Amino acid sequence: MSLPKTLAEDVARNLVMVAKLIDEDPEKAYAYSRIALRLASRVAAVREAAGFAAYATQKYAEALAEFRAARRMTGNVDLWPVMADCERGLGRPERTLAMAGEPEVQKLDKAGQVEMRLVAAGARRDMGQVDAAIVTLQSPELASNSVQPWTARLRYAYADALLAAGREDEAREWFAKALESDKDGTTDASDRLAELDGVEFVDAFEETEEAEETEGTDDGGRTRGGDLDEDLDEDSDEDTDEDVDGTER
């Protein structure tokens, strides 16, 4: 609303492309975010979008700078967990854990607090503190039977931490719980369960292609019908070695 109409429309188009491409083509989304940023760097929504685009392309220092700018403009704490995760990306898990103890966390909504817990647990694992990561994830949200948008990811992270600690039976149980709550397929819990059960998936399409490639070959690698071709060649040679009257040359 603070921009002239034509400029606002140009910025909006670029932000739409960022949102559309950020999952399937992060680099292209990042390029659109830079255009929007060049056009309207004083708009908080633009700084936030630029932050997420940079985050998706693992440009964590740049993402953190954009998120900080957006937060200064709005005073909103919603970006606190992703800012803390940028610190992880920059190899500073200690800073992530410090942010997890700041008053801003108490101002987050339930989803934000769960996200902060996930980020903090990740920081613990970065530091080799797997048991501490497990304890960090243990919460009323984890124990609840209610399925919320964050439930599958929280259960999955807990299962993964248990597996890293060598607690395979418990990990399998929680991967199953994650799968049960993962209606949108946001995790690969089914694959992890299969891996624990020793199940190996075969790509039927690739298997069919291999069968087609090998079909028509004998054990010696020659095409079937090769012997027949050779016999026909020999007969042809014999014909050419004889005169019309049947006597050999």
Image (spheres, rainbow, N blue to C red):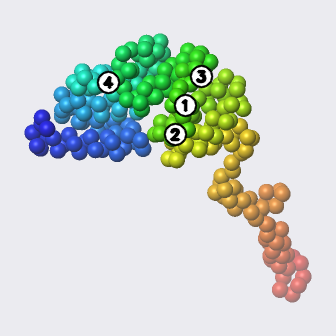
Q: N-terminal of the two: label 4 or label 1?
A: 4
Quadrant where the image shows the C terminus: bottom right
Q: Amino acid at mark 3?
A: Ile
Question: Which residue is found at the position 46% from the left and 20% from the top?
Answer: 88
The three-letter code of the residue at mark 4 reads Val
Check residue 5 in the rendering and tell me which mark sits there, or answer none.
none
Relative height, residue 15 to residue 71 (above, below): below
Upstream in sequence: badge 3 or badge 1: 3
The outermost residue toward the left is: 4
**Contact (Cβ within 8 Å) of mark 1 with mark 2:** no
Q: Nearer the viewer, mark 4 or mark 2?
A: 2
Residue named by callout 1: 142
Compared to residue 213, the image places residue 140 above or below, namely above
The residue carrying mark 3 is 134
Marks 3/4 in contact by CB < 8 Å: the verdict is no
Circle 2 residue? 146
How far is disc 3 from disc 1 in space, using C-alphas? 11 Å
Q: Amino acid at mark 2?
A: Ser
**Circle 4 sits in a helix, a strand or a loop, which is it?**
loop
Of the two numbered discs 3 and 4 on the same chain, state the one appearing first in sequence.
4
Instruction: Name the residue: 66% across, 56% down.
Output: 204
Q: Quadrant of residue 108?
A: top left
Determine whether label 4 and label 2 are within 8 Å by CB: no
Q: Which mark lies nearer to you, 1 or 2? A: 2
Q: Residues within 10 Å of mark 1 (few under 14, many from 20)?
A: some
Rounded to the nearest angstrom, the CA distance separating label 4 from label 2 is: 26 Å
Q: Under tag 2, what secondary structure?
A: loop
Residue 71 appears in the figure: yes
Could you tell me residue 48's position as x and y percent? 29, 31
Q: Quadrant of the N terminus?
A: top left
Q: Which residue is mark 4?
A: 77
Q: Secondary structure at mark 3?
A: helix
